[in-house]
Image: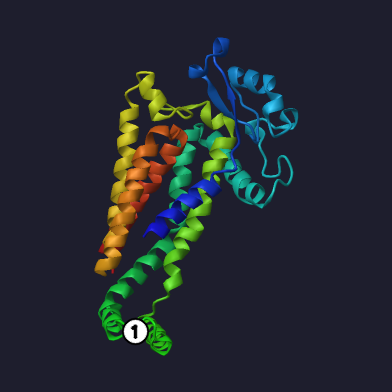
């Protein structure tokens, strides 16, 4: 279990580490009112204050500011090749969100639509994973019997080889592919983190509003500014995260696996609850809609045959 938690944290740290920042202090060098800005943006901001900040701090940027396109004119090929991650994941997603935002005239709504589309595209994989869990439930009695049969013989190499062969036969009998359960995570995680970085590296996503929310403002900043509508945003983040993981937990019948799933889900809910106050509204909207879609999807799959 600890290894799984460590792996999640490692992914969060490594995949989110591509966004670089610089800090601008407040008036008269006031560090309390200092603000951070992304230094490797892929297009120019639109608001005058941000334009002035980036123009004055060109030396802090990791890109040639004068050569950057306006965000509305962003292209997938803008800036040329910048490595596999940025060129094939981050830029295409940023371009899609920008163009969709211009089409629907709101970047917040565009991010919500992207969340639904991504989850919809993942439905075949989710359904396959759900069917695999059902097959695991059917095979659980035989797997438990296999564990009892070889209990205490972990140091017997021949016994372990025989156990592996018998386990493969059980998997084959019920059509189980152990690796398929990881397929969703392997596909979903890179997409999520690429979108996360795309949001951070497109300044215009932080300059617009969705209803009463500033897309670049976090709930913590909103509450400090006495905008108590952000409480609803935090509640929705936590609630949708909790119920999305709760629905997933019911798919396993194995007691030990169920405990591990519950522990992992609890950790993720607590983790998301803590960071929900520091998530920009733009990311929060994507997260809420994506989770809401997952909740509905899991309910439908459980009721289906």
Furthest toward the top, the residue is 28
Nearer the observer, 233 or 29:
29
The residue shown at (33%, 34%) is: 234
What element does badge 1 sit on? loop
Relative to 203, is 121 on the left or the right? left
The residue shown at (43%, 33%) is: 281
Q: Is residue 252 visible?
A: no
Residue 201 in the image: state x and y as whole percent.
Answer: 59, 36
Residue 145 in the image: state x and y as whole percent.
Answer: 26, 83
Residue 106 in the image: state x and y as whole percent.
Answer: 49, 32
Furthest toward the front, the residue is 155
Q: How many labels does the image show?
A: 1
Task: In the rendered view, tell whether residue 235 sits above or below residue 76.
Answer: above
Q: In which quarter of the image is residue 225?
A: top left
Residue 193 in the image: state x and y as whole percent.
Answer: 52, 47
Pointer 1 local density, CA inside 10 Å: few below 14, some 14–19, many at least 20: few
Q: In which quarter of the image is residue 305?
A: bottom left
Q: Which colour scheme is used?
A: rainbow
Quadrant showing the N terminus: bottom left
The residue shown at (57%, 45%) is: 93
Q: Can residue 281 be seen in this view?
A: yes
Residue under pointer 1? 153
Task: In the rendered view, tell whether residue 304 sits above or below residue 65.
Answer: below
């Amino acid at each position: 279990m600890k290894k799984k938690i460590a792996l999640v944290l490692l992914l969060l740290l490594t995949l989110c580490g591509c966004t670089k920042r610089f800090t601008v202090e407040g008036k008269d060098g006031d560090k309390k009112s200092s603000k951070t800005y992304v230094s490797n943006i892929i297009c120019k901001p639109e608001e005058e204050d941000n334009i002035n900040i980036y123009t004055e701090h060109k030396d802090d940027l990791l890109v040639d500011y004068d050569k950057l396109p306006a965000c509305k004119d962003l292209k997938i090929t803008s800036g040329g090749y910048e490595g596999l991650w940025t060129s094939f994941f981050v830029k295409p997603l940023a371009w899609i969100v920008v163009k969709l935002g211009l089409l629907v005239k709101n970047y917040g709504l565009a991010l919500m639509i992207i969340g639904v589309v991504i989850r919809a595209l993942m439905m075949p994989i989710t359904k396959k994973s759900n069917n695999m869990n059902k097959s695991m439930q059917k095979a659980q009695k035989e797997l438990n019997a296999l564990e009892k049969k070889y209990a205490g013989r972990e140091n017997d190499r021949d016994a372990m080889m025989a156990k592996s062969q018998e386990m493969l036969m059980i998997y084959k009998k019920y059509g189980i592919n152990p690796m398929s359960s990881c397929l969703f995570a392997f596909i979903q995680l890179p997409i999520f983190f690429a979108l996360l970085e795309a949001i951070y590296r497109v300044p215009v996503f932080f300059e617009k509003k969705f209803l009463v929310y500033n897309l670049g403002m976090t709930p913590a900043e909103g509450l400090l500014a006495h905008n108590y509508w952000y409480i609803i945003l935090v509640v929705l983040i936590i609630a949708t995260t909790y119920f999305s993981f709760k629905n997933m937990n019911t798919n396993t019948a194995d007691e030990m696996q169920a405990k591990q799933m519950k522990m992992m889900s609890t950790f993720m809910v607590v983790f998301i609850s803590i960071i929900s106050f520091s998530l920009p509204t733009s990311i929060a909207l994507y997260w809420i809609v994506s989770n809401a879609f997952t909740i509905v999807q899991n309910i439908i799959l459980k009721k289906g045959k």
